[in-house]
Amino acid sequence: MPKNKRYDTIIIGAGIAGLYLASKLPKDKKVLVLCKDIPWECNTFYAQGGMVTALDENDIEPHVLDTLEAGSYHNVKAAVEALSRDSIAIREDFVKHGMEFDSAEDGRLLYTKEAAHSTSRILHAGGDATGRYMHMFLMQQNLHMLQKNSLVYDLLIEGGRCYGVRLMKDYKPETLYANSVVIASGGIGSLYQYNTNSRTVSADIHGICVEKGIELKDMEFMQFHPTVFVKTPFARKLLLTEALRGEGAWIVDEDGKRFLFDYDPRGELASRDIVSRSIFLYKRESGKKVYLDFSMFDEDWFIKRFPNITKTFKAIGYNLPRDRVEISPAFHYANGGIACDLEGRVPGIKGLYVAGEAARTGVHGANRLASNSLLEGAVFAKRCADAILQDDNCWEHEPNFDKDYDTLLHEENDKSYKHKLREIMWKDVGIVRTKSGLLEAKNFIYDTKSKKIGRLLELRLNTAAAIVMSALRREESLGSHYIEEKY
Ligand code: SIN
């Protein structure tokens, strides 16, 4: 193996988890951040609302309780406590290094509220461009190598140890070795017809884990964001941040009725799983369209507070806040993921770690509390960096990894199977599920797996199968997993 192909740490993914983790590894370590496409094609970049932090020590307990309640108490409590406890130091670290969150004229940080939070504790930047600002900040801070256009299609695992990765760099296969490999590749958005995710988030690495026998956990808990404009031709649908409702926007039907109160006394501020499901059921029962209404806001205030949304919707013909926007729920976030401990270690595979949305630490339970995701990315990346520096992952001789897939990543009919999969996942493995629908999805997945397909589609199907099988195993509704039909 050529020496220049071996690293101390390879990080797969350049969103908040990958970049923040890199920033916590010393400059003299040989670290490589792999980015599938261009660096800003990641979910962090598109995050609007903000990043939660406990306001102070007294707010840790309420933040923990809000997170547990939103997660239907399916959360791992120790993970939630770590998230909230560490959040104060994370905020201080970002501010100390120069991240500019929105603040008042006297310098006080401004906090907003989102659904299911008992207080305003969400930091934001650029009004509604928090992810973009944080991503740009982390890119500027990055001291390590970052390699673009690098699509990882295999993990080199043997004898309970990870030795590196195989990837396509500018369409050429490459093998890279490392003492530690971190999966920070995000979730699974592209599996669903309607989703808010970057087009790069396509469940490949989860699929590799399934192939290697690495456990995915809580995969039945897929989160659907309630307020998304889906009538665009692009794969990524347009998010309307929950902070809009936190500030007072309403969800109404075509007659202006705030129907959510018929489902939950908190109305627009019920947790995300409840609001999404209520919209879905109301539309189905009434046949009516559903809108997000901003007409209560002062125009100047709105444009300053939500500049991005104002601009994005102006470009497609809306005059906000005067016009209301038709909305639908859409897939947003994977609450489940690759099983790991609270430092991101993947059990049974030495040298393999996971952080951010890809990880299942148990922090979100059955439904993530709004704006806990950027915080999760930072908190668990820092814990993971500390573990990497402490663990002895060095190895002497790598095994011979001769199997490769380089010419078989795509096959001719993959595109049409991929589209069909996205439709089926939306229809049968979406907001409201039935056993018969899940079985239909399972049949499609296993039938397609038996055809001549490329490796990348195979990986997507592995992940889709993990979601469907988890959903079939959980016979009772919980959080974002809602089963309509009794088994
Ligand atoms: C939003 O701004 O509504 C999304 C924030 C999140 O996913 O927590």
Image: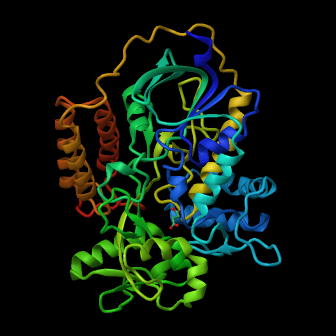
- Residue at left offset 68%, top offset 57%: 84
Residue 76: give x, y in percent of width and height: 57, 50
In the picture shown, does residue 172 fall above or below 436? above
- Residue at left offset 29%, top offset 36%: 457
Q: How many marks?
A: 0
- Residue at left offset 57%, top offset 70%: 128
Query: Which quarter of the picture shows residue 75?
Result: bottom right
- Residue at left offset 69%, top offset 48%: 140
Q: Do we see residue 379 in this rendering?
A: no
In the picture shown, does residue 147 fall above or below 225? above
In the foreground, 52 or 452: 452
Residue 387: give x, y in percent of width and height: 69, 33
Say whether residue 421 is left or right of residue 201.
left
Say whether residue 384 is left or right of residue 365.
right
Q: Quadrant of the N terminus?
A: top right
Say whether residue 194 is left or right of residue 295.
left
Residue 259: give x, y in percent of width and height: 36, 86
Q: Quadrant of the C terminus?
A: bottom left
Residue 279: give x, y in percent of width and height: 34, 75
Query: Which quarter of the picture shows residue 313?
Result: bottom left
In the picture shown, does residue 385 fall above or below 237? above
In the foreground, 282 or 401: 401
Q: Do we see residue 173 in this rendering?
A: yes
